[in-house]
Structure formats: C-alpha cells, structure tokens
Image: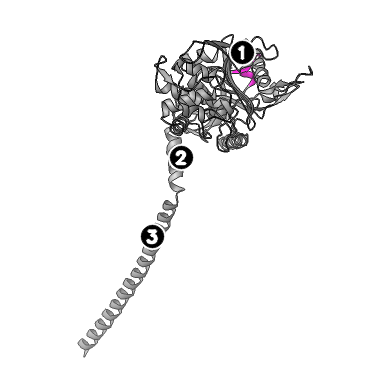
C-alpha cells in the first residue's frame, strides 16, 4: 500500500512539473475580449498593493522608452537632494545638446534661473528635453556623467535589461529598457511625494523668472485631462508620456479606485481607430484605460486558501497507525482574482515535497510550500504543514534500519569477505584435521611395529 501511495505522489509531482511556471496572473486574454484589444507592442499592468502582475505582453522585450526616460532622470535628481528650492541656472551647453533634434521643450532659456521644483515641473509636465539636459549638467557635471548615474541607479534597482544613452529619451540604437524595468523605476520614483505631486498636474503655472514671464505648462498626459473625453480616466494619477519614431506612443501611469492601486506601462503604440468612432486614437492611452477599467471592474481580493485547508497527502514512514499524513495550508492566503472565485477555484502544486516523511511528526511541522494556481497561472504560495501528530514505531524503525544497512554495497562486500573467510577457515580446519589423523595413524603403526619387534626379541 505504501509503495502505491509513493508512486501516486511521485507521479503527481512529475506531472505538475510539466506545467509552465508563471509568476503572473496574466489576464491578457480576459482583457482582450469581444471588440476590445490591446494594440500596443508592449503592455504591462501590475498591482501596487501586492506586486502581482495582472497583464503582461512583451514586458521583458527591450524597447525604446522615449520620454519615459525622464522618470529615471527625475529619480536620480530626487535621490541626490531634497532641497527643492535650490536655484539652477540653465547652461548654454544644455540647450546646445538638443539643438536641431526637434525635441519637445519647456521654453527655458540659457542663463535662466529656476528652482529645482520648477525645473522638475518643466521636465515632467510638458516633457522638456531642455530641462532634462539642464538637470543632467547640474547634477552630473556633464550629460555623460549624469547618464552614468542613471545607469548605475538602474543596476542598483535590479533593472537588468536597461541601458540609457541620454537623460531625455531621444532615440539611439542602445537606449533601451523594458516595461518591467520601467515599472521598477516608477515605483521607486513614486516613493517621493514631490514626484507624485508634479506628475498629477494637468496644468501648472510656472512663476516668472529672470528671463521669462509667468507661463502655463500643460501636461502631455491626456488620460488625466478632463478636456480629452476619449482618453480621460478620473482614477489615473500620472505619470509620464513618451513618443519617438522608434518608441511609438508610450505611457507609464498609476491609478487608484476603491482601495485598489495599479501601475500600467504601454509602449509601441500608434494612432488607429480602435473603437469604431472613425477617429484615430493614441493606443498607448487606449490600452492603459482598457487594462485599468477591466481590473477595477473584475478583480477583487478573495480568500484563495483557508487556514488548515487540505492540500495533499504524503507517505509516512515508521508508523503502525498511519500510512500517510495530510498536509494543510498554514495560513489564509488572499489574492487578486476575478470576483466570485475562492479557494474552490484554485489548485495546488507542491514545491520540493519529499517523497515520504519520517515519523515522529507533530501537528504544525512545516514540510514544504505549494504554488497556488488559478487558471494555470500562479497567484501565490502557501506553506504546507502536518495536519496531525504521528508517533514512531521503534520496531518498524529498527526493521527499516536493518534493511537499509543490509542493502548497502559495503555491507554486501563485508558479508562476502566474511563468508569467504569462514569457508577458508573450515577448509583449513578440515585439511589440518586430516593431517593430524594421518600423523596419529602413522604413530600407531610405528608403535605396533616397534612393539612386535620388541616381543620377538624377548622370545629369542
């Protein structure tokens, strides 16, 4: 019976290993239903509450980020100082570095003096490449020095597929990143309240400076602007747009509604009529809204594993009363799933589960973990523990030890050697006894002959 249980458990583990591992609840097919499609080359939606990936499409594909680069530019500056009143003088080298590139600018001038806060507004709201170059020279000494700081920061954050060539996002062959890396960078930038504040502005009135009158900056992100009815989403808070020939239309944003918080990255979008209104729309904006709207409408935190929920059984050794022991979930687990689903909607795949467990065991002993799977995607993990106590049988343990010892090769070798020695001893004993018997017989013969000869001599 135990051998049958071991076989079944082993077969289950082998079959489970054939399921492709997944760390995301990739609801891409669910988002793309009916007339709704995600048309960008890259789409990513993650939960800011637990870090789970909700939608993923080419999120690890290196791609030109355009002005999404400026999120990293802002992050490097924010990590360098918290003096937002610091006055920065725009150097002529900054403006010369983008001359003739057709860059988006904020209208700052050479020699103009702005506070760091206003320079960040010029960088992030109208997506000023001039502000990016000015900040790079201010904090890096040179643009090249600042770009090194950007790449060092990316490496420090674990962005393994990112390389920056400039602080603004103009296309170069090696200026590349991924949606997953951009999500890491954006989450780090969102830790700064000043960054959250600036990227949420629909418009911002820039105070007069030594070289400019008061002027209004307009955010390039139409998703947060009520004036753009086709794009506006009141749940979205920011963050940054991007657009170049290589990158297409891009947007990184975050949104909050009813206690749920998400971050989205779209890259490689174009203009097309995707909703049948005979108007071509920016697909980076459209994909962003499709993902948010679906998530807010459909996903809820549900209990997908109850404390003490049975997961599987494992063969038990050295116990008279039980041939197997039950493994149950240690704690309750909640996950983002389509509302209405619960612990009955998931299955478990044990991770590194032993082929068998040795008694004695106690209720609550941790054995291994299990993946919690929903629709063939991993949505969490659960610790598996023993469900009941099981005592060890000394007799079964002793029998097993004897069997284990006798099955070892070294024991077999020793047994053969001992057997050979015993056989050799017996053979030697027999040979020696035969020799002794012959010697005794020879002595008797010689004694008898001597005795006869003596008697004969007496008679004479």
Examine the structure image and report whether residue 338 is included in the region drawn in magenta. Answer: yes
Picture coordinates of residue 54, whole percent (x, y): 61, 22
Residue pointed to by mark 1: 224
Q: Which residue is mark 3?
A: 422
Q: Please name the residue that numbered disc 2 is placed on.
A: 400
Which of discs 1 and 2 lies nearer the camera? The answer is 1
Which of disc 2 and disc 3 is earlier in sequence? 2
How crowded pointer 1 is (Cα within 10 Å; few <14, some 14-19, many 20+) is rated as: many
10 Å crowding of disc 3: few (<14), some (14-19), many (20+)? few
Disc on res. 166: none
Location of the N terminus (image quadrant):
top right
Q: Looking at the image, which residue is at 28% across and 81% down? A: 446
CA gap, disc 3 to disc 1? 94 Å
Residue 371 position within the rendered picture, expressed as x and y whole percent measured from the top left: 56, 27
**Residue shown at the point (67%, 12%) measured from the top left:** 228
Q: Label 2 crowding class (10 Å Cα cut-off): few <14, some 14-19, many 20+?
A: some
Q: CA distance from mark 1 to mark 2?
A: 71 Å
Left or right side of 406 for 220: right
Q: Position of residue 435 (x, y in %)?
A: 33, 73
């Amino acid at each position: 019976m135990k051998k049958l249980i071991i076989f079944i458990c082993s077969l289950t583990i082998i079959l489970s290993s054939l399921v492709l591992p997944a760390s995301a609840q990739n609801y891409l097919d669910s988002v793309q239903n009916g007339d709704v499609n995600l048309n960008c080359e890259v789409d990513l939606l993650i939960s800011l509450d637990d870090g789970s990936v909700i939608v993923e499409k080419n999120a690890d594909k290196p791609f030109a980020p355009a002005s999404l680069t400026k999120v990293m530019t802002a992050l490097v500056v924010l990590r360098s100082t918290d003096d937002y009143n610091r006055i920065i003088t725009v150097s002529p080298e900054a403006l010369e570095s983008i001359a003739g590139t057709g860059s988006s600018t904020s209208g700052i001038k050479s020699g103009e003096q702005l506070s760091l806060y206003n320079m960040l507004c010029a960088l992030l709201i109208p997506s000023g490449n001039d502000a990016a170059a000015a900040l790079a020279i201010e904090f890096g000494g040179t643009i090249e020095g600042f770009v090194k700081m950007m790449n060092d920061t990316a490496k420090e954050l674990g962005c393994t597929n990112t390389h920056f060539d400039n602080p603004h996002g103009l296309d170069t062959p090696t200026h590349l990143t991924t949606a997953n890396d951009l999500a890491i960078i954006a989450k780090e930038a969102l830790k700064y309240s000043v960054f959250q504040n600036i990227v949420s502005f629909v418009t911002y009135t820039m105070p007069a400076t030594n070289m400019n009158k008061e002027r209004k900056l307009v955010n390039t992100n139409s998703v947060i602007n009520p004036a753009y009815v086709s794009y506006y989403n009141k749940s979205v808070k920011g963050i940054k747009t991007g657009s170049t020939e290589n990158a297409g239309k891009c947007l990184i944003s975050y949104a909050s509604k009813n206690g749920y918080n998400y971050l989205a990255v779209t890259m490689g979008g174009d203009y097309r009529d995707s909703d049948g209104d005979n108007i071509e729309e920016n697909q980076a904006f459209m994909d962003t809204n499709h993902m948010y709207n679906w998530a807010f409408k459909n996903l809820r935190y549900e209990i997908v594993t109850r404390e003490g929920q049975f997961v599987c059984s494992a063969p038990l050794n050295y116990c008279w009363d039980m041939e197997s022991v039950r493994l149950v979930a240690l704690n309750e687990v909640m996950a983002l799933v389509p509302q209405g689903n619960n612990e009955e909607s998931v299955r478990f795949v044990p991770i590194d589960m032993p082929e068998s467990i040795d008694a004695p065991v106690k209720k609550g002993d941790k054995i291994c973990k299990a993946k919690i799977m929903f629709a063939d995607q991993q949505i969490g993990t659960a610790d598996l523990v023993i469900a009941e106590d099981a005592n060890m049988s000394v007799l079964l343990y002793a029998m097993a030890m004897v069997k284990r010892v006798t099955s070892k090769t070294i024991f077999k070798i020793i047994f053969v050697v001992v057997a050979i020695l015993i056989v050799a001893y017996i053979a030697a004993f027999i040979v020696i006894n035969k020799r002794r018997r012959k010697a005794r017989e020879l002595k008797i013969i010689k004694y008898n002959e001597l005795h006869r000869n003596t008697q004969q001599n007496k008679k004479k």
